Amino acid sequence: MAGQALSAGPTSGRLALMPAAWHKMGSWASEKILPPRELLDEYARGYRLNHRAKSVALVEGRAAHLKRILGNLLPADLTEARLLDHIAKRQAEGASGRTINLELRVLSRALGSTWKALWPRLRKLEERRDAGRHGASSIEVCALVRDDQAGMVCLSGIEPAQAG
């Protein structure tokens, strides 16, 4: 009804309780809004419980670089632009695309979401396709077996004469 004053009615009790609820929500939120340094430590602690030592070492190794560069920011400050700065710093240090992608994957998991959900326009870096083959010559790849009748036989399909 137009022109009538609003009564205090049943909503006044809820309004009186609001500051207390905001106070509780504020204390809860302050416990949950942690800088990436602490989020990564918490994630690594939980990760240690049900993963292999090699996987834990990978997470802790990637987290070390994240803590060093992004450690004191708030999660809200981890924008795509800020992460592009992180990528540029890591590339200047000589880190590969795969390493940087793993770092950002660890960060997104520590934040409790996926890379795509947190930074939808941030593309993954190109990763080398020849990983594990760097510096291996044909002779190193060729497994030779001694056969008394045929001499040396190559099991990989490359003959010793072709290698090198």
Image (cartoon, rainbow, N blue to C red):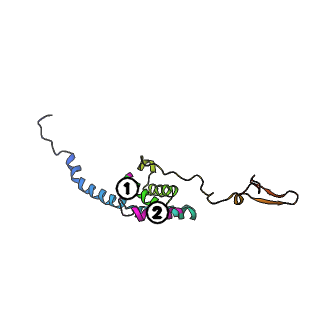
Q: Where is residue 48 in the image (x, y as percent from the top left)?
A: 52, 64
Q: In this view, does 117 lie above or below 131?
A: above
Q: Main secondary structure of the magenta part?
A: helix
Magenta highlight on residue 41: no
Residue extending furthest toward the left: 3
> Which label number is shown at residue 93?
2
Q: What element carries label 1?
A: helix
Foreground of the two, 117 or 146: 146
Quadrant in the picture for residue 132? bottom right
Quadrant in the picture for residue 83? bottom left
Q: Which residue is drawn at 46% across and 61% down?
A: 43
Quarter of the image for the N terminus: give it.
top left
Q: Is residue 10 above or below residue 33?
A: above
Foreground of the two, 56 or 21: 56
The answer to whether residue 79 of the structure is visible from this angle is no
Please state the extent of the stretch shown in magenta in the rendering: 58-80
Label 2 environment density (alpha carbons within 10 Å; few <14, some 14–19, many ≥20):
few
Magenta highlight on residue 61: yes
User: Looking at the picture, which amino acid does disc 2 mark?
Assistant: Glu
Quarter of the image for the C terminus: give it.
bottom right
The residue where tag 1 is placed is 82
